[in-house]
Image (cartoon, rainbow, N blue to C red):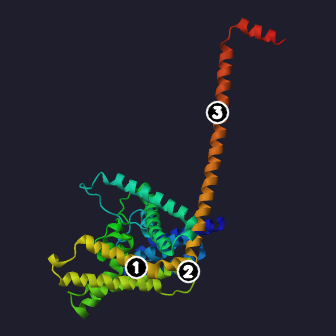
Amino acid sequence: MENEHYNFIKVWILAIISLCYCYYISSKLPKGIFKLFSLTPIFIFFLYLPLTISSVHLVGITAFFLSWLANFKLLLFCFDQPPLSPPPSNLFHFISLASLPIKLKQKTPSQNKSKPPQISILFAIKVIILALLYHCYSYKQNLHKNVVLAMYGAHVYIELELNLALAAIPARAMFGLEIEPQFNEPYLTTSLQDFWGRRWNLMVTSILRPTVYYTMRRISTRLVGSRWTSLPAIITVFVVSGLMHELMYYYVTRVAPTWEMTWFFILHGVAVAVEVLVKKVVPVKMRLHPVVSGAWAIGFHVVTAVWLFLPLLMRNGVDEKAIGEYCKLMDLLKGFLGTCLRSMQSFLFLGLTFWAGSVLVGHVSEWPAEHVALSTSSLGV
């Protein structure tokens, strides 16, 4: 485990050095082929770096942040597109925007002041639920397979949201950056389009939209016309997302892909395209109520996830490995907290001893001289 932590730190040091090159060298080149050529080694390097880590959690974070998000952001950077263009005046801002799952937002005067406490409460609730899920895994051999899969589904959502939120804290704390939320309570979705476009993993949505969706719309406009141009663009986005998820899964398992992950996203892409098509054809008054369409969307997610997505976690032992890493982390934290508690007890004992000695010396120094003489004579001195 210590070796994994060392590799993790080394990988991120190399990533930061690479981003310094992007900031100081590549940013000075004109957009287009020259900048793309200068960044090609970085693309390849970021694809390689996760292969040096084997921990499920650490490789998952590294692969998602560098191999997917950072590479896509740098691809946009090649053509002077946000979020890295124009380059921030501060190097650390550039590194944060490139390597972390964050997107800046402008703070408006109408921003709801009561929302942060609500988010904090929800965050705490999700942490508790995640801890309870890990505790329940000790008894999963006594649970039905579908119950375990449901637990894994909740686990994937909560842990992903918490990890992305925690990753954004340094940029918010050190630089005072206003960050857009990465999730928007996906369980409140009203449709598949609402789920994928406005609620689930919005960082990926904000990256795939300019890199894939807009590009495909421009291409498909010539083929199918402006009215239907969004349909092939939507399906293409989900195909790319499926391939990237397949790559993320390969980093974690290091086994040949079975493409079930890709088919999961292709199926959802087709479903979203059909939903958009229906909305274009069916009048607003004849559409399903948001509660009904939301329930259908959640049901569709559950069925397809149980069919194609979640079984992959059990097939290659990813679940057991992740649970084992969590147990090791908990043991490490317990040992650390125990050491801290023992140290505090020792310091408290020494402090009380010093205080008692000081009080005693103070009282002795205040005794009259005859009392001191009497005390010493009684001791035979």
Asked which quadrant contains residue 202, the reply is bottom left
Residue 179 x, y percent position in the rendering: 36, 61
Give whichever of discs 3 and 1 has the lower sequence position: 1
Give the Cα distance between marks 2 and 3. 56 Å
Judging depth in this view, the residue of 42 and 125 nearest the camera is: 125
State the mark number for residue 303.
1
- Whether the residues at callouts 2 and 3 have beta carbons within 8 Å, the answer is no
Local SS, label 3: helix
Please, what is the three-letter code of the amino acid marked with disc 3? Gly
Residue behind mark 2: 315
Residue for point 45% across, 78% down = 306
Give the Cα distance between marks 2 and 1. 18 Å
- Between label 3 and label 1, give the one nearer the viewer: 1
Quadrant of the snapshot with the C terminus = top right
Please, what is the three-letter code of the amino acid marked with disc 1? Val
Label 3 Cα crowd, 10 Å radius (few <14 / some 14-19 / many 20+):
few
Label 1 Cα crowd, 10 Å radius (few <14 / some 14-19 / many 20+):
few
Residue 220 x, y percent position in the rendering: 27, 90
| Vertical position of residue 112 compared to residue 137: above or below | above
- Whether the residues at callouts 2 and 1 have beta carbons within 8 Å, the answer is no
Task: Find the residue positioned furthest to the right.
Answer: 380
Local SS, label 2: helix
Quadrant of the snapshot with the N terminus = bottom right
| Vertical position of residue 97 compared to residue 113: above or below | below
Label 2 Cα crowd, 10 Å radius (few <14 / some 14-19 / many 20+):
few
Give whichever of discs 2 and 3 has the lower sequence position: 2
Residue behind mark 3: 351
Judging depth in this view, the residue of 84 and 335 nearest the camera is: 335
| Vertical position of residue 239 compared to residue 291: above or below | below
Please, what is the three-letter code of the amino acid marked with disc 2? Arg
Residue for point 24% across, 85% down = 277
